[in-house]
Image (spheres, helix red, strand yellow):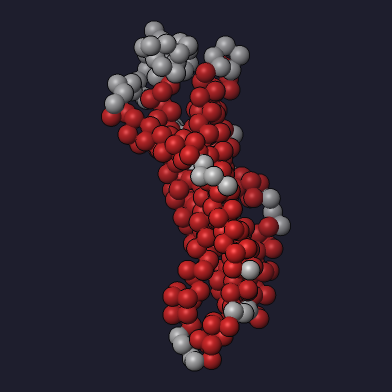
Amino acid sequence: MKLPYFSLICVVAIVFLSFFGLFFYNGDAYSLNPNAILLPPSFEHLLGTDRLGRDLLARVMEGGKVSLSIGLLSSVITSFIGLIIGVSAGFFKNKTDKVIVILIDLFLTFPTFFLLLALVSYINASMWVLVIVISITGWMGMARLIRSESFSISNAPFIKILQIANINKLKIIIKYFTPLLAPIFFISFTFGISGAILAESGLSFLGIGINPPQISWGTILSEGKEVIDIAWWVSFFPGLLIFMVTYSLINISDYLQSITNSKESQLG
C-alpha cells in the first residue's frame, strides 16, 4: 500500500489552518456584524458569514483548535488506558485477565455514544470535561486489541526465558514487551483521534457538547442546521473539515496496519 500523501497533506493543512491560520487572516471569530448576516462566500468573507454576521472561516479556524485538541488529547489518554489494561491482561493472565475481560464487557454492554450522552447530560460540558468523558468511554477497543496481541507475545520463548531468569516484571513489560505493541498502539491511536472528533462533533451538534462562547466544529454545525435551507455554507464547511480529517486519519491508520501486516507475514 502506497503512502497516503493526500491524507497526510490534508491533516497537516487542517492542523496548520486551525492553530496558525488566524495569524494570517484578519477575520474575527466572535465579532458580530448586523450588516453582514448570512452572506455567501465572497472575497471579503471567504467561507461566508453566519446568522449573527460572524466570519465563518475565522470560526472554523477557532473551532478547529477545540475539536482537534479534544481528538488528540482523548486519543492519548484512551490509548494509554487501553495499553495498560491490555498489557496487564495479556502478561499476568489468570485472575487479572478474567477481571479485565469482565470490565471490558461491562463497558461494551452500553453503546458508546449513549454512554457519552448519559455522562454529559449531568455535567456542564467543556473541552476538558469532554476529553475525560470520551476517554472513559473509548478505551475498550484499544484494550481488546492489546490484550489479544499481548497473549501471543507473552508466549514467546524469549519472554519466558526472562521470566524464568526472575527479571523484574515491570522491566520486562517496559523494555521488551511494550515495544512490540507499538504498531498496534499507533494504529489505534490514529484511529482514536478521528473517533474522538466525531464524538465531540456529535455531542456539540446535539447541544450538549461544547458550550458558547467556546467554538468547535460541532457547535458551528449545530448553529447551521437552523438556516441550512437558506445558508448551506454554515454547515457545509465545518462538516467538510470533519469528513476530511476523519477520512484522512482512517487512511493513515489503514496504511500503518498494512505495514504491520506485511512485517508479520515476512516474519511468519
Residue sticking out furthest to the right: 109
Q: Quadrant of the C terminus?
A: bottom right
Which residue is found at the position 52% from the left and 18% from the top?
A: 233
Which residue is found at the position 58% from the left and 22% from the top?
A: 225
Is 176 located above or below residue 162 in the figure? above
Is 149 located above or below residue 47 in the figure? below
Identify which residue, 88 or 210, lies in the foreground: 88
Q: Position of residue 140 (x, y in %)?
A: 61, 59
Q: Position of residue 51 (x, y in %)?
A: 48, 16
Which residue is found at the position 36% from the left and 12% from the top?
A: 44
Q: Position of residue 90 (x, y in %)?
A: 60, 74
Splitting the image into 4 quarters, where does residue 214 fall? top left
Identify which residue, 1 or 124, lies in the foreground: 1
Splitting the image into 4 quarters, where does residue 235 fall? top right
In this orientation, does residue 160 appear?
yes
Residue sticking out furthest to the bottom: 165
Which residue is found at the position 59% from the left and 79% from the top?
A: 156
